[in-house]
């Protein structure tokens, strides 16, 4: 039970950390330099590897508890050990699901920011091309 509680805390804490990273990514203003270098996107993408390492570490601990055990307790004694463990695993599963949703949202937001930067870059280049051709026609 104690290890399962630690897993729930781990998944929740790391999901909050990913959510904070997502908020920082989406709330940061993009400068003209960012359009060309995409440095912020690259730095953020590097964090994804760390987040997946966290997931793998926690999943290794989680998988140990998914082994089906045969328990012979009398039903009159209340919930069986298996029912109690199934309930605990359900809580861990929901915490894991929240972590994965946060990670998925983070990856989606990185893609959206990158798409926005690409759009701004192509738009800027198109405007520059129009200005240059207009100036070339005048001269």
Image (spheres, grey):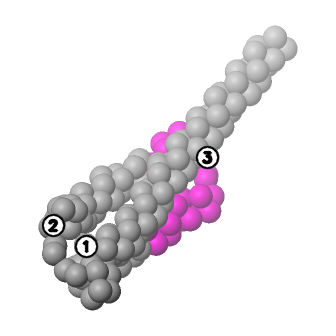
Residue, disc 2: 69
Q: 56 or 34, which is in the foreground?
A: 56
Q: Quadrant of the N terminus?
A: bottom left
The label nearer to you, 2 versus 3, is 2
Question: Whole-percent x and y of residue 40?
Answer: 47, 52
Q: Quadrant of the C terminus?
A: top right
Question: Whole-percent x and y of residue 69?
Answer: 15, 66
Instruction: Tell me how far mark 2 sits from mark 3, CA to CA.
Output: 59 Å
Q: Is residue 111 left or right of residue 99?
A: right
**Does residue 33 show up magenta in the picture?**
yes
Question: Whole-percent x and y of residue 49?
Answer: 30, 52
State yes or no: discs 2 and 1 in contact (Cβ < 8 Å): yes
Q: 102 or 134, which is in the foreground?
A: 102
Above-or-below relation of 103 to 82 = above
**Does residue 55 show up magenta in the picture?**
no
Residue drawn where x is 20% and y is 67% of the image: 65
Above-or-below relation of 94 to 85 = above
* Numbered tag placed on residue 82 in the rendering: 1
The label nearer to you, 1 versus 3, is 1
Q: 32 or 61, which is in the foreground?
A: 61
Instruction: Tell me how far mark 2 sits from mark 1, CA to CA.
Output: 7 Å
Q: Which residues are magenta?
A: 15-39
Q: Is residue 25 left or right of residue 8?
A: right
Would you identify the image quadrant in which residue 55 lies? bottom left
Residue, disc 3: 32
Residue 58 in view in this figure: yes
Judged from the image, the secondary structure of the residue bearing numbered disc 3 is helix
Q: Main secondary structure of the magenta part?
A: helix
Residue drawn where x is 27% and y is 88% of the image: 77
Above-or-below relation of 123 to 3 = above
Would you identify the image quadrant in which residue 130 lies? top right
């Amino acid at each position: 039970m104690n290890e399962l509680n630690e897993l729930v805390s781990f998944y929740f804490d790391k999901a909050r950390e990913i959510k904070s990273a997502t908020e920082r990514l989406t709330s940061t203003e993009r400068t003209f330099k960012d359009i060309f270098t995409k440095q912020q996107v690259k730095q953020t993408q590097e964090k994804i590897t760390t987040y997946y390492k966290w997931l793998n570490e926690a999943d290794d601990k989680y998988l140990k508890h998914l082994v089906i055990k045969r328990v012979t307790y009398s039903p009159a004694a209340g919930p069986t050990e298996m029912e109690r463990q199934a309930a605990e695993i359900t809580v861990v599963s929901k915490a894991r699901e929240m972590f994965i949703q946060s990670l998925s949202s983070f990856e989606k937001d990185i893609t959206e920011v990158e798409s926005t930067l690409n759009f701004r870059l192509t738009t800027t280049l198109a405007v520059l091309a129009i200005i240059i051709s207009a100036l070339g026609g005048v001269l």
